[in-house]
Amino acid sequence: MTQKRALVVRGGWEGHEPVKATELFLPFLRDNGYAVRVEESTDVYADTAEMARTDLVVQCVTMSQITPEEVAGLSSAVVAGTGFTGWHGGIADSFRASAEYLHLVGGQFATHPGREPCERRGEAADNFRPHTIAVTEAGRTHPVTAGVEDFELHTEQYWVLHDDLVDVLATTTHPVRAWEPWHRPVTSPAVWTRHWGAGRIVVTTPGHSLDVLEHPQVRTIIERGMLWATRTASAS
């Protein structure tokens, strides 16, 4: 059997600790038989030969910039069968100025509603809210989330704009609150998959900090997502 090749691309905003966050998952990839290459920039996306032999891209790059050549290389690789996955801002809040990237991923971070204004102290925890990650009916039978029960988190709750080509495996609902401008609860995808050409994409929105990534259900979803997104034999 040919060894699978995983490419881990990390960088961008340091608040999401891209090095420490990705290091959590490198042993899992290696234990599952992947040869792992780690890159500290998106330059590699423009390397056609390298992308063609990559079976899985794990990206952790919040905000930042990407060139047209790089995003075209990533998109072309996914269309040809390379899997693409990541968590939180490292995939859902990357390259805000690139319409091509947003089209590839199918969903984009919009905000994370925070505490009541009078409770805010000018720190990261101002944006932490208790919320539920609820597995959908589709998610209950999907390989990425099957057997995962609904679970609670106290961290950033992503509000995501998305299109209808995503298959939503889990959601989270933003309630109506007196100090916010919306007038009815808003449900956002928290975990989704996307078929793009011959490739598979998995996005997991929880993952702001290392403790969230180490949460048993979050980690299970991310790790299963890596396996499921990896290039299949039919895409080779």
Image (tube, rainbow, N blue to C red):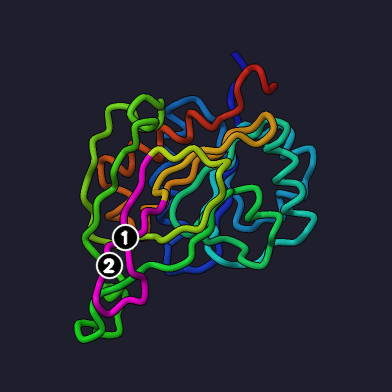
**Where does label 1 land, which residue?**
185
Q: Quadrant of the C terminus?
A: top right
x and y, in percent, of residue 197 in the image:
69, 33
x and y, in percent, of residue 154 in the image:
23, 60
Say which residue appears at 76% left-offset and 46% top-offset. 73
- Residue 74 visible, this angle: yes
In the image, is 77 to the left or to the right of 195?
A: right
x and y, in percent, of residue 85 in the image:
52, 43
In this view, the residue farthest toward the top is: 1
Q: Is residue 175 above or below residue 76?
A: below
Q: Nearer the viewer, residue 217 or 176?
A: 176
Q: CA distance from mark 1 to mark 2?
A: 5 Å
At label 1, the amino acid type is: Pro
Question: Does the residue at mark 1 contact the one at mark 2 (Cβ under 8 Å)?
Answer: yes
x and y, in percent, of residue 68 in the image:
78, 58
User: Which mark, by number, is residue 220?
Assistant: none
- Image quadrant in which you'd find residue 209: bottom left
At label 2, the amino acid type is: Val
Query: Magenta span covers which residues?
Result: 170-188
Q: How many marks?
A: 2
Q: What secondary structure is found at the residue carrying circle 2?
A: loop
Q: Nearer the viewer, residue 19 or 65?
A: 65
Say which residue appears at 73% left-offset and 32% top-offset. 80
User: Which mark, by number, is residue 176?
Assistant: 2
